[in-house]
Amino acid sequence: MFITAQFDSGNIEVLEASQPDQIKLAIRKDHQSDFYQWFHFKLYGEAGVEHTMQITNAGDSAYPDGWKEYSVVASYDRDTWFRVPCEFDGKTLTIRHTPEQESIYYAYFTPYSYERHQDLVQWAQQSIECEHVLLGQTLDGRDMNLLVIGEPDEQKNKIWVIGRQHPGESMAEWFIEGLLSRLLDDEDGAARKLLENNVFYVVPNMNPDGSVRGHLRTNAVGTNLNREWAEPSLESSPEVYYVLNAMEESGVDFFLDVHGDENLPYNFLAGSEGVPSYSDLHQQLGARFKETLLAITPEFQVEHGYPVDEPGEANLTIASNSVAERFKCLAFTLEMPFKDNANLPDPDFGWSANRCQQLGADVLSAIYAVANNLRG
């Protein structure tokens, strides 16, 4: 028996692995940070034998409530990821599973590898509608990739979509893959119509360093990028620095920042009601955006989510609030669950990569519903 996390986005420390029923593990903290929750490891063992794996430091993780009613994802082929029920006693997360094959991967959510990210960028670049822009390099020397979709024109709306500021929230890049697949489909009528009057600026992965390192929430030097939008720096948050500079050059009429929430088993939006420039127009457009999503997919809901900020009380270091105020635009944070969608549960797969992709495609319809009125 052997356990390893020496691969892209791997994260686990092996404390004990002498017997299948006495495996003790710990999640490694993000580098230069106390955040941890993401894990991803490979088990080599005997097929047909139950393995009991205890993650001993789960109770002190960033979001301990996230382990309640949580099921781990597992895969034999790294393509199909299914759910394995877990137990959480407030301190330890226990996974009991009998592998059917000699090796198996376990993860906090379906991983989205850096290789797949590179494939996504190069695939998108093949479209005549898409320009691939290199914004700069991360602290670990990886590319900050921007996809510009549509012919830039001053009169067109500028629609920005970013994902994975928090690298462990891999569902965000699955979502963006689904959005891009529809947006770049030249036989999709809504996509074709949108590109007549809108240009999309898409950053599929805001935090490639943290993604490869197996971090939950921070970049290579322990910076939470979603608290850097007021004053980003090349020393601690070059990812935000480069993207914000590109936004200043293009302008922003609509902004969507895609995330995952550890605790809440729902898909929901958080708006920017608390920024000083929030207006009646933003309220009306936001309501129409949500109503459209509610009408086209049962995966979305508005009953559960974050408390709405009081007027003038928004945290302007957070991306959606900062961009909303800086560009006086409609802006949202979209959250998806690490668990399942409690309104539409699937015990075999839970909230999955496929469902993320479908939601990404569906969101394009909601953007279509508001696009013609973004500038009033």
Image (cartoon, rainbow, N blue to C red):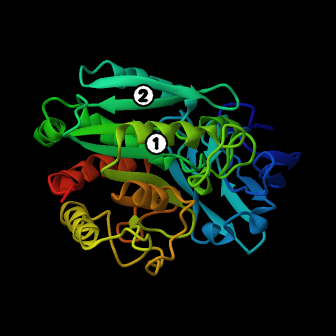
The residue depicted at 82 percent of the width and 46 percent of the height is: 13
| Label 2 Cα crowd, 10 Å radius (few <14 / some 14-19 / many 20+) | some
- 212 sits to left or right of 364: right
- 105 sits to left or right of 121: right
Which residue is at the far bottom?
310
Label disc, if present, on residue 332 of the rendered structure: none
Question: Disc 1 on helix, strand or loop?
Answer: helix
Position of the C terminus, as image quadrant, is bottom left
Q: If you read the primary sequence from the N terminus, does the residue marked by circle 2 or circle 1 appear first? A: 2
Question: Disc 2 on helix, strand or loop?
Answer: helix
Q: Is residue 134 above or below residue 190?
A: above
The residue depicted at 42 percent of the width and 71 percent of the height is: 276
Which residue was labeled with disc 1? 173
Which residue was labeled with disc 2? 120
Type of residue at label 2? Leu
Residue 261, horizontal then vertical, whole percent: 53, 62
- 10 sits to left or right of 145: right
- 328 sits to left or right of 79: left
Q: Is 20 or 87 nearer to us in this picture?
A: 87
